[in-house]
Amino acid sequence: MRNPPLAWRNVAHGGRRSVAAISGAAFSLVMVLLQLGFLQAVRITATNNFDVLDFDVLLTSARFEQFYAPGFLPLERLRQAQGVATVESATPLYATFALWRCPPSPLDAPPDDSGPRPGALSRWLSGSRTARPLQRRQLYVMGFDLDHPPFRPPIRDSIEANRARLRVPNRVLLNAESHPDFGWQVRDRYRDWELEDTAVEVVGGFDMLRGFAADSTVLCSDDDFVRICGYGSRETINLGLLKVEPGTADATVSALRETLPGDVRVSSRAEVLEHEVDHWVNQTSTGKLFAVGVLVAMNVAAVVVYQVLSNDVREHLPEYATLRAMGYSTLRLAGILIFQATLYMLISFAVAVAISEVVYRATEALAGIPMVMTRENLALTFALAMAVGAITGGLTVNRLRSADPADLF
Amino acid sequence: MRLGRNIPLAWKNLTEHKLRLLASVAGVAFATTLMFMENGFRKSILDSMVNIIERIDGQVVLVSRTLYTLSVPFPFPMERVVQARGVEGVASASPLYTVTRSSFWRNPETGREERICVVGYDPADDLLDVPELKEDRELWSRPDTAMADDLSRPAQFGEFRAGQVSELAGKRFEVVGTFALGINVQTNGNLVVSDRNMMTAFPELDGPSLMDRKVQVGVIRTAPDADPRRVRDALAEALPPDVRALTLDEFIARERDFWDKVAPIGTVFYIGVVMGFIVGSVICYQVLYSDISDRLPEFATLKAIGYSNLALYRVVLTQALYLALLGYAAGLIVSHFLFQWVNRMTGLPMDVPRNNPGVILLLTVLMCLGSGAYAARKLISADPAQLFA
């Protein structure tokens, strides 16, 4: 055998040593993936709210901060916007936080609410069966014209399936992905729902991610919204959703900016999403904390991987010295070494992705935030792993020069 | 025969190669930093959520029965506060008003209206234990004046200073002084105003009569000889069930509990701490295992001259302990600077002493000893004869 696959054999026959090296590198990569996942969750929850809405151009109050603090604007601005030729339709969306009567659990014998709350783990394990007192908690309510629901499928489909039922006053749809405290799981056995001070009936559900800001969402007709949330009339709205003729979004935005008074902000879809991500990732402390988390995890991963690989070389030094004595050039040994480092990182990366998948699902279940392993994050982690692997491999080549066959004995 | 009595073998093993020691300590230090960071983030968020409550100068509070977090308005009528004054053991009962979601301050520099948290109470009551608020009492008792939090997010509010004139809730207000309270994940800025100014700015809090005003927290000072828990029970007995009496500590605990256990934020960082611990354990195992492998001949020789497995175990565990302590010390220093940086960046309260340094030390030692014990299993197989195989 002229060219035994030495790098591969080193890894494959390393036994516990290889396992230790791979698990060390893998777990630090898991940490990186986890932190990236947290940051991604902030992005996803930021854009998801607008992703479910069907619009090309958005009208908001000049006070607009983010989806959950939109400010108010007069409905009149929407009528004015319809005067612009390229605007096909303009639909108002009413949206605000409101109080929801969360059913107790168990329904017939709620616990006293002065005791300590169960932790996330026990909540997750017992799910909707977690003992909890009757509570009024905040959720996000959105009201809209039932004949023109400004949502994209699948939420639009859920609305259309329940449209007839929603026409009866005080009927709502509850987010099926709500925090279990909000009672979606016991909807068949519970009747005493209340939104603000009004008794309501849950006639169906829809699927919308919940995020860091709202634990649940409720949809209802604009008439119900205005009455229940105390808006007084339909003339004050929170968001104006415009559909425009295809390809005219940018032109419409500039036309609207000229037409409409200064109390309105006009944004294209892309601008809204960018603003929202910027707000949650760069302006809030949550986003910043996760960004720091990513940075620190990457440093830790680099240190650990270096540690793992340089240990490995040191342990194989006698073998390398023997190989040199047999006539292998330093260059050839360096090649083996770097190849081996790459091999370690490839295996570690694969293991890390598998472990992360488990950790992601656990986080999703425990914290109720969407954890998605995006291609970008995978590529970033992979690049980090490869770069650190190659650099470490390169750095340890120096050691080889000192691999003197005579030392062996 | 006990090993290491005369020769600090564990220490010598650890420090034989300086570069290697550096790498090992760096590994443990980073694991410690990870745990510090995740735990610190969690704690700082929880601490920041109770920053206002912690400053309340009173022993017992009245809150609405339905209140689950202070950042959601759950008002109750002022009448309850007045009723509380008649309860035995109550020295004084005063209303505290808050508006967190619907209050806007116009940044005088950019002209943009920014959401701000407004707290209102009678300046004479000194409900918040903040020195500047007590000293400047006369100033912010005047109509249309407010005290502003220095620690509000500069990107939104610019720099607050006395004499600034702008709008709160669309009405002209003057900043007459600043104080330091801090922000949290719900609010990016704070203003404190007098109860009268509160009613001017937010007429929705006012009612047909004084008794109907919408109070968020009733702050109760107990008589000097009264036990706060007794007073709490007496209040619960005397008042209608729409309000709940809590000692201040209970109130703080409830608020933290909500953000820690119910909101996703606390859970996310818990997962971070656990992951940090696992990563740290793997690093330690890696360090100690490769060290033992390297020294197997030495250990085998020691065994040959009569040292027991237990004695060798002790050497490895001592070495693990040293590694833990060195790594912890280094991690502490790194975390300190990391926290300072995060504090500057986010305005969240972050410092090492508040973030359970003891618990992290315990975790670090556990992590190193655990992986040391696991790695040391190899010693049992250390056969002197192998030396010459």
Image (cartoon, coloured by chain):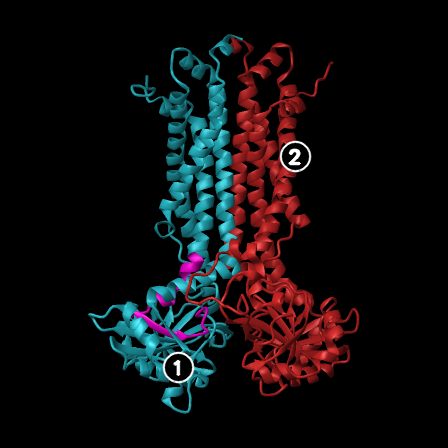
Chain colours: A red, B cyan
Q: Quadrant of residue A181?
A: bottom right
Was residue B66 drawn as part of the magenta stretch in this picture? yes
Q: Secondary structure at mark 1?
A: helix
User: Is-magenta flag for residue A408?
Assistant: no
Residue sitting at x 65%, y 76%: A172
Q: Which residues are magenta?
A: B44-70
The vertical placement of B354 against A13, above or below, is below
Instruction: Please give the residue where the numbered disc 2 appears in the rendered image.
Output: A346
Label 2 crowding class (10 Å Cα cut-off): few <14, some 14-19, many 20+?
Answer: some
Amino acid type, mark 1: Met
Q: Residue at x 47, y 24 (%)?
A: B291
Percent across and percent down for residue B120 are 37, 77
Q: Position of residue B11 (x, y in %)?
A: 36, 25
Would you say the residues marked 2 and 1 are in contact, meaning their CB atoms lie under 8 Å apart?
no
Instruction: Decide if residue B87 is in sight here.
Output: yes
What residue sits right under mark 1 in the picture?
B198
Residue B12 is situated, as x and y percent measured from the top left of the image, at 37, 22
Residue at (73%, 75%) from the top-left corner? A162
Query: Which quarter of the figure has residue A251?
Result: bottom right
Side of B26 relative to A339 (left or right): left
Q: Chain of mark 2?
A: A
Is A181 above or below relative to B162? above
- Relative image position of residue B227 (x, y in whole percent): 25, 68
In this rendered view, identify the residue nearer to me: A225 or B312. B312
